[in-house]
């Protein structure tokens, strides 16, 4: 059942407001409210940007143009009536698992008491939801990971995880849009380009989109 408690609102300086919708474990239902609220508040007077996160939403506004009291009232009203968000695209993501493309797969499987093929089967079974896009350009935070594959992040992050790496960290899956440091486990790699500044929509995925991981021949 969808949580009906109001979100927690906190100011992040004079020109930003953070809406915390879950205040606990991640919820897909709360995330849909976040998407709907982000869409609905884009036209609020003085609004500069709405930035969905994982069960939270950051609003950046012009304090000289924004009626903050009205904004807070609209947030609470919008939260109560928010319906389902946009129906995003569904896209297949081809993945080469293991070997040089997925250097953590074998150790990850051993730690889980599974074979590598069992990990791949569990990882490719769900239809994932793009809960949020951020941290780096085009990076997708994916909900829907099999709970049996949840794993703490590495205590010592790597300096450069290659672009296209298909990764697991905590209870989430993700894909690296650029080569960058990360403490997530690398299970495979895709050639799909998640971010290209020359495209009309630089980020391939948007919140509310869905994807399936499809294994290529090992």
Image: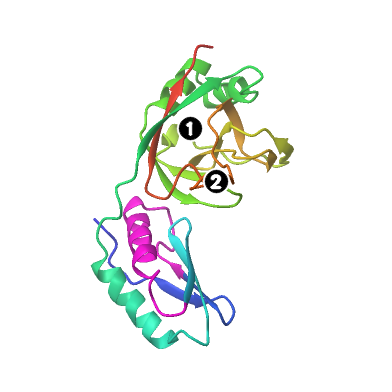
Image x and y of residue 103, in percent: 65, 23
At a point 55% along the width and 20% down the height, the residue shown is 97
The reply to whether the magenta stretch includes residue 171 is no
Q: Are marks 2 and 1 in contact (CB under 8 Å)?
A: no
Mark 2 residue crowding within 10 angstroms, few (<14) / some (14–19) / many (20+): many
Colouring scheme, one of rainbow, by chain, secondary structure, one colour: rainbow
Q: Sequence order check: which comes first, mark 2 or mark 1? A: 2
Q: What SS does tag 1 mark? A: helix
Nearer to me, 22 or 32: 32
Which residues, given as a range, are shown in magenta?
Answer: 19-46
Q: Quadrant of the N terminus?
A: bottom left
| Residue 112 position within the rendered picture, expressed as x and y whole percent measured from the top left | 53, 26
**Which of labels 2 and 1 is toward the front?**
2
SS for callout 2: loop
Residue that carries the numbered disc 2 in the rendered image: 138
- Which labelled disc corresponds to residue 40? none
- Residue 75 occupies which quadrant of the picture? bottom left
| Residue on which disc 1 sits | 149
For image coordinates 54% across by 12% down, the residue present is 218
Label 2 vs label 1: CA separation? 23 Å
């Amino acid at each position: 059942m969808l949580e009906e408690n109001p979100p927690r609102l906190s100011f992040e300086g004079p020109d930003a407001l953070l809406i915390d919708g879950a205040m606990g474990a991640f919820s897909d239902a709360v995330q849909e409210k976040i998407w709907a609220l982000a869409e609905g508040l884009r036209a609020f007077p003085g609004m500069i940007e709405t930035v969905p996160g994982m069960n939270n939403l950051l609003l950046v506004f012009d304090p000289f143009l924004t009626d903050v009291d009205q904004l807070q009232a609209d947030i609470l009203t919008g939260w109560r009536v928010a319906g389902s968000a946009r129906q995003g695209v569904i896209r297949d993501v081809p993945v080469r698992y293991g070997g040089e493309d997925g250097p953590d797969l074998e150790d990850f499987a051993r730690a889980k008491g599974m074979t590598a093929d069992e990990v791949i089967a569990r990882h490719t079974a769900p239809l994932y939801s793009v809960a949020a896009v951020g941290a780096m350009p085009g990076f997708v935070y994916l909900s829907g990971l099999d709970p049996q594959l949840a794993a703490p992040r590495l205590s010592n992050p790597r300096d450069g995880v290659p672009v296209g790496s298909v990764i697991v960290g905590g209870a989430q899956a993700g894909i690296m849009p650029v080569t960058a440091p990360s403490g997530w486990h690398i299970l495979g790699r895709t050639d799909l380009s998640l971010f290209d500044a020359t495209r009309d929509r630089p980020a391939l995925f948007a919140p509310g989109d869905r994807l399936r991981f499809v294994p290529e021949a090992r």
